């Protein structure tokens, strides 16, 4: 088994693919320290102040002299990142592979979209009725079951009241996008009655809806809200039971790209594999979405150079500097990342993390940038505004219209969003130890190569689109989190 890797010929560090011992020789140097899997060691002397190069790009500067064979990490490396920057557009070729299309079996929707699930959702306008939403779902399932469709799920959250300005509008927007999501055959919107997120204004924000599939209930306006809610859910269920899957080209899919609990192998196995998948689905005429804007910092110029044109480049600049402004406005350094778990797994700086993270986008052109108020409407690779936090990011990506999420992880997480969230392990140890969480083992890339694993991943996505449950669905791990930036009363 190969125990080390030099990712790019210009790198001055190598990455350990397994735990290495002091005194052993790898890549022509004798190790001066033990080096854990996912961590880096110097291939040659690096003077204090010199760049540390990984992925062919600077990931840090040396904060002390580093000898060949020495462990390179937070104790002797420091980020180069600063605040807002000026950028220039240097367009590069972004060829896509010739690919063979696939077919998927999906639910056609009235508006021309498709869903990969036919679920019934209960969405509270305010956290005060979370308990009622869950009790309505539970009572319905105990009384009638879910034969003929894919289940009843209550998506609770703590917001909808005592929020001001942008936070209030974002709550209303995210919940409204969920109501319109094609994976939901029908939705019961459940309100309290006195909340800021008033049902009348919320309904108006949705525009025209199918009143057989989307129904509304204000708890303060009825005697027994549980019985009334169950009645409405049954009416919706009776309609969506008639929905049937139909064959469509795989180009109908919108797929979100996310990482969480990353480690030093994320940018070597799982993320580049997902990047190859992104290129595949885009070449086949489909859509992928990359978010986690703070985890683009340090790699943003590479994305900018892939913009299809100058206006798209300018959108990416706005995306990056806008999120940096959010950090600065709140008195935070833009490089306050990676997390303790990331560092334990071998990621040293935000540049190190970002250069690995953005590999999920593949090498194709950036077609569009979507900000907080929009849906993904353009085929191809899209960038989406939003934070790196797993729950908020997955909620944002799914709310923008994605049918499922490819979620790479080196440390492991059981989390799942309101759409199928396929967990892709960066290493075989994680895939084995947390088989109840992990859907796909990208650690096998090190044994069989990218081409074989890409075929397997495409097959898994097709199966999931056709109805095979993701591990988060089997575990009933389905959460939403709404990004909040302002004041709560």
Image (cartoon, grey):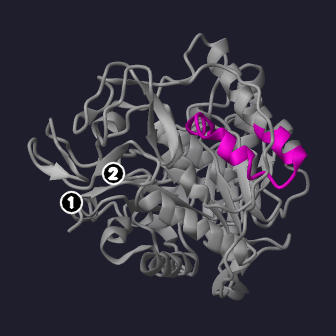
Q: Position of residue 365 (x, y in %)?
A: 75, 59
Q: Position of residue 21 (x, y in %)?
A: 10, 45
For marks 1 and 2, the one nearer the N-term is 2
Judge left or right: residue 42 versus residue 235: left
Q: Position of residue 456 (x, y in %)?
A: 45, 80
Quarter containing the N terminus: bottom left
* 377 over 53 or under it: above or below: below
* 99 over 65 or under it: above or below: below
Q: Which residues are magenta?
A: 293-316
Q: Main secondary structure of the magenta part?
A: helix
Q: Quadrant of residue 150?
A: bottom right
- Given residues 218 and 352, the one toward you in this image is 352
> How many discs mark residues in the rendered view?
2
Q: CA distance from mark 1 to mark 2?
A: 10 Å
* 162 over 113 or under it: above or below: above
Q: Residue at x 64, y 54 (%)?
A: 398
The crowding category of the residue bearing disc 1, from other C-alpha atoms within 10 Å (few below 14, some 14 to 19, many at least 20), is: few
Q: Which label sits on residue 412?
A: 2
Q: Residue at x 71, y 78 (%)?
A: 284
The residue that label 1 is drawn on is 433
Q: Residue at x 58, y 32 (%)?
A: 128
SS at mark 1 in the image:
helix
Judge left or right: residue 315 versus residue 118: right
Q: Residue at x 29, y 23 (%)?
A: 75
Whether residues under marks 1 and 2 lie with C-beta atoms below 8 angstroms apart, the answer is yes
Q: Is residue 228 visible?
A: no
* 399 over 440 or under it: above or below: above
Q: Is residue 299 magenta?
A: yes
SS at mark 2 in the image:
loop
Q: Is residue 4 magenta?
A: no
Judge left or right: residue 33 versus residue 221: left
Q: Position of residue 375 (x, y in %)?
A: 79, 52
């Amino acid at each position: 088994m190969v125990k080390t890797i030099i990712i790019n010929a210009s790198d001055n560090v190598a990455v350990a693919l397994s735990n290495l011992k002091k005194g052993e020789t790898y890549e022509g140097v004798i190790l001066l320290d033990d080096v854990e899997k996912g961590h880096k060691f110097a291939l040659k002397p690096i003077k204090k102040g010199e760049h540390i190069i990984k992925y062919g790009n600077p990931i840090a500067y040396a904060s002390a002299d580093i000898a060949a064979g020495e462990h390179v990490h937070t104790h002797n490396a420091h980020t180069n990142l600063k605040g807002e920057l000026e950028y220039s557009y240097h367009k590069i070729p972004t060829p896509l592979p010739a690919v063979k299309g696939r077919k998927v079996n999906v639910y056609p929707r009235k508006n021309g979209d498709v869903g990969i699930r036919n679920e019934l959702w209960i969405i509270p306008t305010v956290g005060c009725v979370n308990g009622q939403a869950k009790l309505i779902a539970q009572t319905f399932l105990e009384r009638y079951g879910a034969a003929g469709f894919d289940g009843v799920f209550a998506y609770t959250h703590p917001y909808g009241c005592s929020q001001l300005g942008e936070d209030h509008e974002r709550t209303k927007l995210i919940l409204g996008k969920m109501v319109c999501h094609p994976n939901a055959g029908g939705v019961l919107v459940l309100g309290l009655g006195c909340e800021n997120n008033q049902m009348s204004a919320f309904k108006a924000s949705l525009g025209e809806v199918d009143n057989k599939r989307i129904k509304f209930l204000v708890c303060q306006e009825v005697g027994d809200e549980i019985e009334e809610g169950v009645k409405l859910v049954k009416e919706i269920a009776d309609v969506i039971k008639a929905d049937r899957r139909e064959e469509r080209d795989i180009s109908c899919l919108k797929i979100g790209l996310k990482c969480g609990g990353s480690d030093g192998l994320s940018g070597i196995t799982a993320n580049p594999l997902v990047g190859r998948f992104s290129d595949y689905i885009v070449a086949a005429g489909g859509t992928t979405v990359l978010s986690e804007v703070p985890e683009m910092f340090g790699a943003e110029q590479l994305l900018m150079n892939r913009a299809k044109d100058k206006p798209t480049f300018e959108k990416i600049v706005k995306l990056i500097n806008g999120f940096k402004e959010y950090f600065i406005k709140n008195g935070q350094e833009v490089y306050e990342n990676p997390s303790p778990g990331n560092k334990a797994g071998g990621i040293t700086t935000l540049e190190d993390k970002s250069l690995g993270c953005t590999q999920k986008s593949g090498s194709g052109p950036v077609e569009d940038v979507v900000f907080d108020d929009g849906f993904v409407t353009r085929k191809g690779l899209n960038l989406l505004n939003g934070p790196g936090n797993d729950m908020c990011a997955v909620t944002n990506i799914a709310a923008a219209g994605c049918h499922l999420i490819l979620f790479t992880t080196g440390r492991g997480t059981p989390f799942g969003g309101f759409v199928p969230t396929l967990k892709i392990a960066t290493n075989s140890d994680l895939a084995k130890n947390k088989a109840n969480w992990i859907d796909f083992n990208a650690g096998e890339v090190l044994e069989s190569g990218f081409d074989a694993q890409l075929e397997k991943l495409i097959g898994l996505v097709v199966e999931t689109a056709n109805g095979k449950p993701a591990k988060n669905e089997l575990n009933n791990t389905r959460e939403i989190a709404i990004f909040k930036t302002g004041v709560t009363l």
